[in-house]
Image (cartoon, helix red, strand yellow):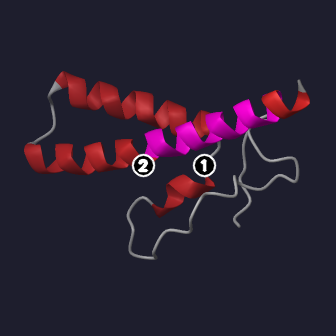
């Protein structure tokens, strides 16, 4: 499992990415998402949504951005699910 560089509190206790993250194929343009911290993925997702909302990109680029957004959103959801599980387990 790939180590992630990022802010404290957004990783597993051993510093690794969440266990249910699956390694992406080498030709996947979104393979780098798996190594992002929650904050990195969230910030890129916010920027990506702004680009899509302002309508300045063409249809083909919009489709690629949408796919990347889906990968970023899924990654953020995984981090949040793991954080919730840790909080629930501690409480």
The numbered mark at residue 36 is 1
Q: Which of marks 1 and 2 is nearer the N terminus?
A: 1
The secondary structure type at the circle numbered 1 is loop
Q: Quadrant of residue 39?
A: top right
- Residue corresponding to mark 2: 71
Q: Residue at x 88, y 53 (%)?
A: 14
Q: In this view, does 47 lie to the left or right of 90?
A: left
Q: Is residue 85 magenta?
A: yes
Q: Is residue 78 magenta?
A: yes
Where 44 falls versus 54 (above or below)? below
Q: Residue at x 81, y 28 (%)?
A: 87
The C terminus, quarter of image = top right
Viewer-side residue, 51 vs 28: 28
| Main SS, magenta residues | helix
Q: In which quarter of the image is residue 88?
A: top right
Q: In this view, does 60 lie to the left or right of 68?
A: left
Magenta-drawn segment: 72-87
Q: Position of residue 47 (x, y in %)?
A: 39, 30
Q: Position of residue 59 (x, y in %)?
A: 9, 44
Q: Which residue is drawn at 70% across and 40% down?
A: 82
Where 89 falls versus 16 (above or below)? above
């Amino acid at each position: 499992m790939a180590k992630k560089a990022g802010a404290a509190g957004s990783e597993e206790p051993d510093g690794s990415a969440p266990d249910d993250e699956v390694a992406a194929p080498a030709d996947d343009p979104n393979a780098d998402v798996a190594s992002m911290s929650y904050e990195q993925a969230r910030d890129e997702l916010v920027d990506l949504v702004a680009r899509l909302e302002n309508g300045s990109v063409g249809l083909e680029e919009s489709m690629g951005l949408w796919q990347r957004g889906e990968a970023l959103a899924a990654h953020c959801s995984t981090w949040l699910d793991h954080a919730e599980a840790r909080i629930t387990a501690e409480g």
